[in-house]
Amino acid sequence: MRILMKIELPVEAANAAAKKGMLGSTIQSILEEQKPEAAYFTEMNGRRCGIIVVNLDDASKIPALAEPWFLAFNANIELGPAMIPADLAKAGADIERIAKKFA
């Protein structure tokens, strides 16, 4: 299952890593281990933020995704399932059935 991870790095922890010259290399090390399908970095809520897309076959792998960010940066993380257009198209019949039943 495709998982969308939103990773917010607290300003203090990210600044400390940046001052040590470790911000980029730590992020790169985590990404090399997690092998995301896609990774984007931006600012959200006044913090450095990453949006990472990973494939997850087993829910027991969630700690392997989250813990490196928690431990390295004391990050705030949100996880949720994500669909590509083909997944949404595949869900069309269920959406239609549910809409007829509950609308």
Image: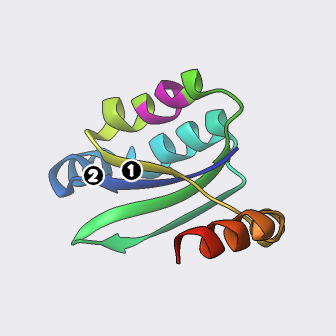
Give the quadrant of the N terminus: top right
Type of amino acid under label 1: Glu
Q: Height in image: 102 above or below 31?
A: below
Q: Which amino acid does label 2 sit on?
A: Ala
Q: Position of residue 78 (x, y in %)?
A: 39, 50
Question: Predominant secondary structure in magenta?
Answer: helix
Q: Residue 78 carries which label?
A: 1
Q: Residue at x 65, y 26 (%)?
A: 58
Decide whether residue 93 is among the magenta residues: no
Q: Position of residue 29 (x, y in %)?
A: 56, 37
**Depth-wise, is mark 1 or mark 2 nearer the camera?**
1
Tell me the residue that label 2 is attached to.
Answer: 14
In the rendered image, the residue lying farthest to the bottom is 103
Q: Is residue 7 left or right of residue 90?
A: left
Query: Does the magenta portion include 64?
Result: yes
Q: Residue furthest left?
A: 12
Which residue occupies the extreme top position in the image? 60
- Separation of marks 1 and 2 at Cα, in angstroms: 18 Å
Residue 36, compared with residue 44, is above or below; it is above
Residue range highlighted in magenta? 62-66
Q: Residue at x 50, y 61 (%)?
A: 51
93 or 10, which is in the foreground?
93
Of 16 and 64, the residue lying toward us: 64
Which tag, 1 or 2, sits closer to the chain's start?
2
Q: How many marks?
A: 2
Colouring mode (rainbow / by chain / secondary structure / one colour): rainbow
Rendering quarter of residue 73 = top left
**Other residues around mark 2 within 10 Å, as few (<14) / some (14–19) / many (≥20):** many
Left or right of 53 in this view: 69: left
Secondary structure beneath dot 2 equals helix
Q: Badge 1, how many Cα within 10 Å: few under 14, some, many 20+?
A: few
Residue 21 visible? The answer is: no
